[in-house]
Image: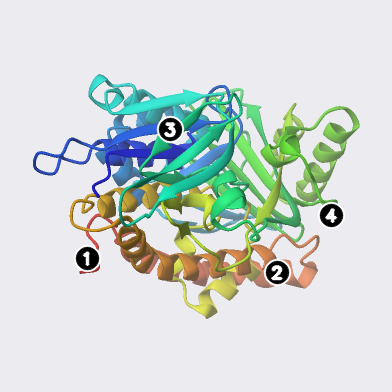
Amino acid sequence: MPISHALIMGAGPAGLAAALSIAKLPPSGSTPPIRVTVLELRPDVATLGGAINLTPLAMRYLDRLGAGSRLRPRGAPVAAGIDMVSLRTGALRGTLWKGVDALRVRRHDLAMSLLEEVRVPENSARIDLRYGVKVVGIQEEGDPSADGAVVLSLENGEEIRGDILIGCDGLHSVARTKYVDPERKEVYSGKASAYGYAKVDEPGNAGITRSDGQPCVIDSTIVGGRYGSLLATFFTQEKKDVYLAAVMNMKNEYEGDTARDGWKAKGEDKVKVREDISGRFRSGKLPGLAELVESVDDWTMFPVYQLPPDGRWSKGRVILIGDAAHAVSSESALRLKFFIRHMLTLSVQMPPQGESTGVAIEDGVLLARVLQRHMAREIPQLFDDYEKVRRKPIDKLYKESVWRWNSSSKDDAGWLGGIVSDWMLSAVLSFMDFNKSDYFVNDVEQLQLPS
């Protein structure tokens, strides 16, 4: 039976990108376009999430969806690349992604750009977006290969029916835990990502100088030292604020929705976080860095969870994409060989960059392309087609990102480790720059689908 109505749980970047991708599919013959209903638990667009890095491939998808032109004026191009700077020497160790079409932008602005595109009349005619909706039950009627439906029970007693359900509701997915794979639980990593914003006195000048006299932060910079790394980046075209992010070991396991979604440090915790981060980067040869860190008034903490490998992505009429399915943390690591990835881990303990958002957007784009064949293939076959194309690269990426995450964020790399990483990273980045044209070529809209 053809698909006429798709339900989506989650109105983050993954859910909105999937909704737009499906809504923009051309009609098949006399069959009307697929109608989409998006359900979001939060009452409005989430404001937490920090500044993410969108790769050239992610921007390519957003441009096609119509959100790219809305987003670019809100973000800061990373045309100069991501500079790697040594805290110990104050020297530039190398640059990653120089000259590529990447964009640093707040996650909230990405969601708003997608939302604005959803509300364009020709899209809103096909997409019903509802906030403040809590799904308490998921069940199916009939056979996924024949007549039937997926039925969502809402907290207010309402029921919503559709032909398929796409779970885009993140790492703590209700679609996964209540239906597709209840046994696959997220695991706290023992680490948290801390981020905050600092005002600058002069637009484009973060007040930090390298040993060669050049500004330390041109677009995006990762400062590496023996006690970890600090991301410092502009994230708007005006360059009036700097986004700072680091990783902290926090061994207590956090429970509850508030902890999972992140929280702002207050009182003694705020002082402790500021002292912890500034203490790691106070000594070194980058004047102005410690002062910039200490000027951050509010630090937001995000406990980092991971999903066990493998697991189910679909069951019956329900499929998971994005963090609900795989929760990978880095896009660019996929193409590195073992030696290179090992050297990079030794060379820089990198805070989360947010490239997983691009992976989630890509999931939605690919799934929509698969669903375009819904007149000729049954739902289980469509979901199987998606997995055949997506599972292998995601599995590689998942293993890579988890390995790199667990190998990094050490409390102290040691005096010798800091020295070794300084001379090693330049060679690693040279290799990566040599291969940069190969990083983002796997456009999922060009991949061959199973016959």
Picture coordinates of residue 116 (x, y %)? 36, 23
Image position of 343 (left or right of 7): right
Using the rendered image of the protein, determine whether residue 80 is visible from the camera's viewpoint.
Answer: no
CA gap, disc 1 and disc 4:
44 Å
| Front label number (4 vs 2) | 4
What residue is pinned by disc 1?
448
Please report whichever mark, 1 or 4, sits nearer to the chain's N-terminal start. 4
Point 39% across, 53% down: residue: 98
Residue corresponding to mark 4: 251
Label 3 neighbourhood size at 10 Å, few (<14), some (14-19), many (20+)? many
How far apart are the two marked residues, 3 and 1, measured between alpha carbons? Answer: 28 Å
x, y percentage for residue 252? Answer: 85, 51
The answer to which of 303 and 211 lies nearer the viewer is 303
Residue drawn at the location 17% of the way across and 35% of the way down? 32
In front: mark 1 or mark 4? Answer: 1
Crowding near the residue tagged with mark 4, few <14, some 14–19, many ≥20 C-alpha atoms within 10 Å: few
Q: Secondary structure at mark 2?
A: helix
Q: Nearer the viewer, mark 1 or mark 2?
A: 1
Q: Residues within 10 Å of mark 1 (few under 14, many from 20)?
A: few
Which quarter of the picture shows residue 74? top left
- Real-space Cα separation, disc 1 to disc 2, in angstroms: 46 Å
Furthest-left residue in this view: 29
Kindly identify the amino acid type of the residue bearing the numbered disc 3. Answer: Val
Residue hosting label 3: 38
Residue occupied by mark 2: 419
Does label 3 or label 1 sit earlier along the sequence?
A: 3
